[in-house]
Amino acid sequence: MTPIRIGIVGVGKIACDQHVPSIRANPAFRLVGTASRNAAIEGVPNFPDIDSLLEGVDLDAVALCVPPGPRHDMALRALVAGKHVLLEKPPGATLSELDDLVAAAGREKVSLFATWHSRHAAGVAAAKAWLATRMVRRMQVDWKEDVRRWHPGQAWIWEPGGFGVFDPGINALSIVSEILPKPIHLTSATLLFPGNRAQPIAADLAFADADGDDRVMATFDWRQTGPQTWTITASTDDGDLVLENGGAKLTIGDDLVVDGADVEYAGIYRRFAALVGQGESDVDLRPLRHVADAFMIGRHVRTDDFDD
Ligand code: NAP
């Protein structure tokens, strides 16, 4: 098979930590260039912006690893140029900006992939399979991490469109919406905003499903120092299912089912290659919709100023 020639736009933390090694480890892809204002990847040409990348090198696809704010314009340029597009999460800064991207992908007959990396964590598929035949009485989501440790110097994350604590929290919602057998909708939310920041540092969410209220409760908090928590617990009549470490570790009752390595981005690139091969797109906006709902109906509460 001829490798898919791919360029990366936005050479920041996630591009260097995950995209470059995952692309280079997958023979279905060949990294042919990058677009970055401040960085470069050894061994491939770097261009200052996406337009010069699209003009300067022959490629089939681009992976957009920039923050959500500037992503829509870049995605549209790439799609209109006939390139397959992989979007980092969250897929956009608004819900409706995804509409013309989906339309453009259809028009140009290229693949658009809105990735949710946490769905590829080692325990998620088995959790989904186990829950598929069970009634989830209650689900508790605790996503608590230290923003200073995971997002040092990322000013964009605190600005409008940067999502604040929903930047990691949307990963939890991507797993929840993947593994729950029934759809849920947000019924209440409280968002804590530092006095000096435009995005929330913590949030509490409650979701209902068709069978009742408070089916899923979620706490996202960026102020957790010490041990970090990325845990989802589902209570069923057959016992508890617990996903830990962001979905990498799965326990059902007393049985440790999976305690896997970091396979998320390998999974993303396998899926992208399959989508391109099949001429399909995959754009699931449910996690983004839950976050939009939280900003819409959430009670906004001011809390202490936060400095990096
Ligand atoms: P980052 O370290 O800040 O890197 C983003 C890069 O995008 C920057 O280095 C910058 O590269 C480029 N960029 C282009 N336009 C920009 C703009 N207007 N503002 C800021 N940067 C701009 O961020 P990241 O952590 O890699 O996150 C990027 C995306 O990946 C986010 O959507 C995030 O949610 C997602 N993600 C991050 C992680 C993680 O652990 N960090 C994990 C999974 C997903 P140049 O200066 O080189 O142009």
Image (spheres, rainbow, N blue to C red):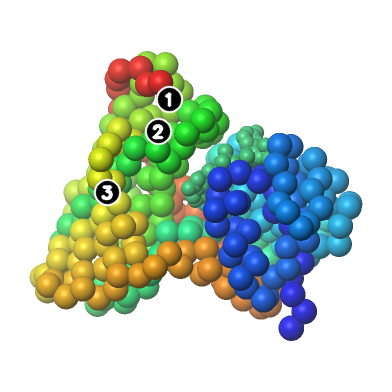
Q: Quadrant of the C terminus?
A: top left
Label 1 Cα crowd, 10 Å radius (few <14 / some 14-19 / many 20+):
few
Taking the spot 67% from the left edge, 45% from the top edge, the residue there is 10
Label 2 Cα crowd, 10 Å radius (few <14 / some 14-19 / many 20+):
some
Quadrant of the rendered image holding ligand 1? top right
- Look at label 3 and name its amino acid: Thr
Q: Which mark is residue 229?
A: 3
From what the image shows, is residue 111 above or below residue 169? below
Residue corresponding to mark 2: 148
Q: Which mark is residue 308?
A: 1
- Look at label 2 and name its amino acid: Arg
Q: Are marks 1 and 2 in contact (CB under 8 Å)?
A: yes
Describe the element under mark 3 as helix, strand or loop: strand
From what the image shows, is residue 61 above or below residue 154? below
Q: Percent from the top left, x then y, of residue 229?
A: 27, 48
- Look at label 1 and name its amino acid: Asp
From what the image shows, is residue 36 above or below residue 171? above
Q: Percent from the top left, x then y, of residue 66?
A: 62, 43
Quarter of the view holding residue 63 = bottom right
